[in-house]
Amino acid sequence: MTLSGNAKRLSAYIGEADRYDDRPLYEALLESARMAGCAGATVLRGMAGYGATSREHAKHGVRMSVDLPVVVEVIDVPDRITALAEVYAAMIADGLITVEDVNVVLYRGGMTGGPEE
């Protein structure tokens, strides 16, 4: 697959404990991106954070959620990202989905090892 120039980045912000069909939601989102033929996806686990459902006030400020934040990012052509955003919206009960314009400078794959091979 070739990917360069103008593209879109879909970011799904969810909780680590979120589930979909009896498995972690981030795994289901990752699998959905793979099945959609996307160029690639990354799951990032946050160290701390809060969202709309975890904004409880504590005695000394905001109490952070114990359900750590997870971000699933996918970069691909606009049409594929638009379709995937609809799939993600149907899968995510609580969270945030964003889509941004990006410029792909380099997308390279297929190497099995380091530069020496």
Image: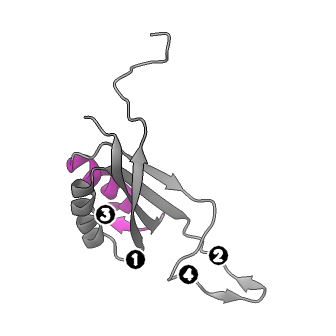
Quadrant position of residue 50: bottom right
- Cα distance, mark 2 to mark 3? 26 Å
Which of pointers 4 and 3 indicates the residue nearer the eye?
4
- Disc 2 or 1, which lies upstream in sequence? 2
Residue at 63%, 65% in the rendered image: 48
Residue at 58%, 59% in the rendered image: 46
- Cα distance, mark 1 to mark 4? 11 Å
Dot 1 amino acid type: Asp
Dot 3 amino acid type: Asp
Residue 15, percent from left and from top: 47, 68
Residue at 49%, 61% in the rendered image: 70
Disc 2 and disc 3 in contact, CB within 8 angstroms:
no
Dot 4 amino acid type: Ser
Residue located beneath label 2 in the image:
64
- Disc 4 or 3, which lies upstream in sequence? 3
Residue 105, percent from left and from top: 43, 39
Q: Which quadrant: the C terminus? A: top left
Residue located beneath label 1 in the image:
94
Dot 2 amino acid type: Met
Disc 4 and disc 2 in contact, CB within 8 angstroms:
yes
Which of pointers 1 and 3 indicates the residue nearer the eye?
1
Nearest the eye: 105 or 17 = 105
Secondary element under disc 2, as helix, strand or loop, is loop
Secondary element under disc 4, as helix, strand or loop, is loop
- Magenta residues span 16-36
Residue located beneath label 3 in the image:
22
- Cα distance, mark 4 to mark 3? 23 Å
